[in-house]
C-alpha cells in the first residue's frame, strides 16, 4: 500500500514515516503545503534510516499529490489545520482512500493540559464531518509520544486505539498498525467513542509533567 | 493507618479491601449505610483471605463510624451517591482525614460508555466542593477493573493515577497505593486535572467490549 502522511514534516508525521519505512514494506509519501519542505524532510528521514542500514522508500510531495497517489492518508497536522487540510485535498479522496486522523484538541493552563474537543465531540468526528461522505475515516495514533516514535532507538511496547464506523477500514488500519514493531492496535468501536481516546493525549502529557522518571510516555492496556 | 472503605460492600470496595488486607499492615474498616451488611461483607472477605492463609484484620461499621475511626476514607460508592455519602459522614471528617474518591460519571448508549462529568468538571472536583473545606481530597483508584482487583488470583501490573491539591495527602496515598502488589501510583497533578483521569474509565470498559481477548482491563503508562 501507499501511505501519505500529510503534514509529514511535523513530529508525529516524522515518527510514523520512520517507523512505517523501517518496519513495513509499504511506500511512504510525505506531504506538505510546500513540496520543497516535504523533500527536505524526506532527505532527513532517509539519512536517518540509511544510518541504520534501512534502504528507505520515501517520497515528498505537495499534500494534494501525496493524497492522490495513496491508499491511506494520515492527517498528521495540528487540530486547527484539520479542516483546511481536508479541504485542500478533498478532490484526491474517494471511497477507496482511508482517511486517518491522530489530532487531538487540547488547551493548557498552569495545572497541565486539558482535553478541549470541538463542538462535534472530538476532532476525529470533526474529520468525519468535513471529509466527503464516501471516504472512510479512522481515528488512530492519537496517544503516541512523538519523540519516542521518532527515536528509532526507542523500543516501543505500546497500544494505539482505533475508532471507525467502517469495519473494513478499521481492519486495514489494525493490520497496518500491528506491522510496526512494538505497537498493538486495539478496537474502541465507532467514531462516537473517539472523545475518550483523544482524552488520553493530555493525560499522558500531564503524567510526563508530574513524574520525573516518565518522559515521552505512552499507554498499554492489560 | 486505618482505612475506611465507605460503600465497601460494593465491587471496588471489595477489591480494595482484599488487596489492602492481604498486601499491607493497615487496618481496613468496611462502611455501609447498613452496618449488618458491612459485617456480612467482612465475613466474606475474611473467609476469602483465610483460604489464602491471610489472617485478616477487617471490621464492619455504619459509614459514619467507619469514617470517624479512620485516617483515610475512601468513597467507594457510585457517583450519584457521592454527595449524600459525604453529607452523612461530614462530622467525622477533619483536616487529619484524607478523603479519597474513585468514582466516575459515565453514561452509556449502543456504542459504548461515555465520560459524563458533573458541572464541576469531574466527580473528583465535586467531592472537593462538597467536603468540608479543611479535608484534603485525593482522586485515586478510578481506572481499576473491580473484577481484576477482587480476584486475588490476578497478579496486577497496573498504574493508578492520583490528583490532589494537597501534596502531603497525595504523598500518603502514593505510598499506600505502592504497598499494593503490582500497583504503581502516578502523579497527575492537582484536582483540576481529574477529568482526563476519570475519562480513562469508560475507555477501558469500551476496550473490554470491543476486544474479545481483553477483559477487566487496566492501564499502564510507559
Image (cartoon, coloured by chain):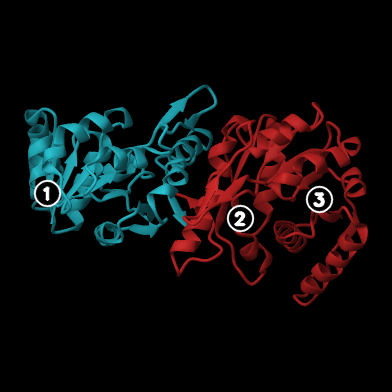
Chain colours: A red, B cyan
Res. B1 visible in picture: yes
Relative depth, front residue between A110 and B79: A110
In 3D space, how far apart are the residues under numbered discs 1 and 3 (Cα atoms)? 56 Å
In the image, residue A149 above or below residue B79: below
Relative depth, front residue between B97 and B179: B97
Residue at coordinates 32% horizontally, 32% vertically from top-left? Answer: B79
In the rendered image, which quarter contains the N terminus of chain B? bottom left
* Residue where numbered disc 2 is placed: A144
* Relative to B219, A43 lies left or right: right
Instruction: Give the x, y percent position of residue A190.
Output: 61, 31
* Relative to B9, A107 lies left or right: right
Q: Residues within 10 Å of mark 3 (few under 14, many from 20)?
A: many
Instruction: Give the x, y percent position of residue A111.
Output: 46, 55
Residue B81, located in which quarter of the rendered image?
Answer: top left
In the image, residue A30 above or below residue B107: below
Residue at coordinates 41% horizontally, 32% vertically from top-left? Answer: B118
In the image, residue A172 above or below residue A50: above
* Residue where numbered disc 1 is placed: B70
Res. B44 visible in picture: no
Q: Residues within 10 Å of mark 1 (few under 14, many from 20)?
A: many
Amino acid at each position: 500500500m501507499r501511505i501519505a502522511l500529510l503534514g509529514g514534516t511535523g513530529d508525529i508525521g516524522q515518527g510514523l514515516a520512520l517507523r512505517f519505512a523501517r518496519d513495513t514494506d509499504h511506500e511512504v509519501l510525505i506531504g506538505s503545503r510546500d513540496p520543497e519542505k516535504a523533500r527536505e524532510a524526506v532527505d532527513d528521514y532517509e539519512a536517518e534510516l540509511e544510518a541504520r542500514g534501512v534502504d528507505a522508500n520515501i517520497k515528498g510531495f505537495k499534500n494534494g499529490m501525496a493524497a492522490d497517489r495513496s491508499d491511506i492518508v494520515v492527517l498528521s497536522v495540528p487540530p486547527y489545520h484539520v479542516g483546511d487540510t481536508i479541504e485542500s485535498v478533498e478532490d484526491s479522496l474517494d471511497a477507496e482512500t482511508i482517511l486517518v486522523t491522530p489530532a487531538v484538541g487540547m488547551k493548557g493552563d498552569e495545572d497541565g493540559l486539558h482535553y478541549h474537543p470541538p463542538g462535534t465531540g472530538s476532532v476525529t468526528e470533526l474529520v468525519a464531518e468535513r471529509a466527503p461522505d464516501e471516504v472512510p475515516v479512522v481515528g488512530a495514533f492519537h496517544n503516541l509520544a512523538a519523540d519516542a516514535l521518532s527515536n528509532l532507538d526507542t523500543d516501543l511496547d505500546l497500544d494505539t486505539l482505533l475508532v471507525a464506523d467502517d469495519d473494513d477500514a478499521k481492519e486495514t488500519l489494525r493490520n497496518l498498525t500491528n506491522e510496526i514493531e512494538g505497537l498493538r492496535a486495539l478496537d474502541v468501536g465507532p467514531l462516537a467513542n473517539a472523545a475518550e481516546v483523544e482524552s488520553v493525549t493530555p493525560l499522558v502529557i500531564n503524567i510526563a509533567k508530574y513524574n520525573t522518571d516518565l518522559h515521552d510516555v505512552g499507554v498499554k492496556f492489560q
